[in-house]
Image (cartoon, grey):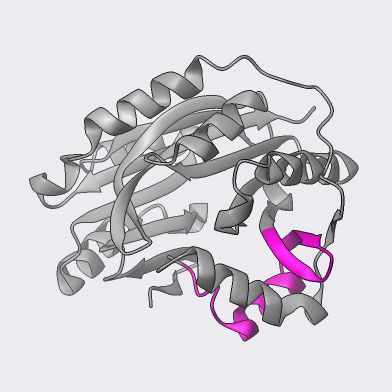
Amino acid sequence: MDSIEKIGNSTIHHGKDSDRIYLMTLDSSDLDNITQKLDDLAHKKGYTKIMVKAPDLHKQVFEENGYETEAIIPTFYSGNPGRFLCKYLDEQRRENKWKATCSEILKIAKEQEPDSSLIQLPDGFRCREANSEDVKSMVKLYKSVFESYPFPIYEEQYILETMKENLIYFGIWKENELVALSSIELAKKYSNAEMTDFAVRKEYRGSRLARYLLRVMENKLSELSVKTAYSIARAKSPGMNVTFAKNGYTYSGTLINNTQISGQIESMNVWYKSIF
């Protein structure tokens, strides 16, 4: 399982599953040596990619050390721009073997007209915020949907800990069965939130449950006065890319061969939306 650690005061996620380092939170106090420390760790572990999420004003530090921008969100840090920058340590890592498929899916998604019409759940379904009593059924659903995942969502303790920290989970139940799930990963300091961990049981796909959850989560962000919502969606997933496009999200770039999910490393599309 990939792990989450600190380099100085900055937070990284790394491991052989995704075969890369992801600098999730950059502390400006680490700027003088962060690129060298990332390089050292990558070479020690044999990783083939480093990905960095950083404010636009720090881009030069990374660009001077061989990083290139793969996505930009104009309002990411309390209304100021943020970038996803990457450094490839193996040229084969930057080759997207599903490029044609991903390009076609993105084309279809971009052609969608934003749809603000009311979405209603089918009869017998209900949606609410998930709590600690739901953890067993949440883990069960994640295991049924994802063969593998970059974060330990199969562990009850992980779900419980994230609930206490900065994640808000929402679920849809059919009677007493949890059939769809998603979460908000809050970064209150920067007034942004990642819309993530979408999982819908196979037999209920096509029922617009993911879109319903997305609307519910956006309403929650409005209540919390969070400015920007974003998501990192599998580039090979027509459903999720269309879901974000229909909900008024803007495509901002593709992270090539970035994340190990469901048994293979996949490219990911970045989408964002201003909540207010």
Query: Residue drawn 82% across and 73% down?
Result: 131
Measured as percent of width and height from the top left, residue 168 is found at 75, 61
Name the image quarter holding residue 38.
bottom left
Residue 160 appearing in the image: no
Name the image quarter holding residue 181.
bottom right
Measured as percent of width and height from the top left, residue 51 is found at 34, 50
Q: Nearer the viewer, residue 140 or 224?
A: 140
Horizontally, residue 274 falls left or right of residue 2, namely right
Residue 69 included in the magenta stretch of the image: no
Query: Residue drawn 31% across and 64% down?
Result: 263
Compared to residue 33, the image places residue 267 above or below, namely: above
Outermost bottom residue: 157
Horizontally, residue 21 falls left or right of residue 162, namely left
Give the quadrant of the N terminus. bottom left
Measured as percent of width and height from the top left, residue 85 is found at 35, 40
Residue 152 included in the magenta stretch of the image: yes
Measured as percent of width and height from the top left, residue 23 is found at 42, 57
Name the image quarter holding residue 147.
bottom left
What range of the chain is rendered magenta?
151-180
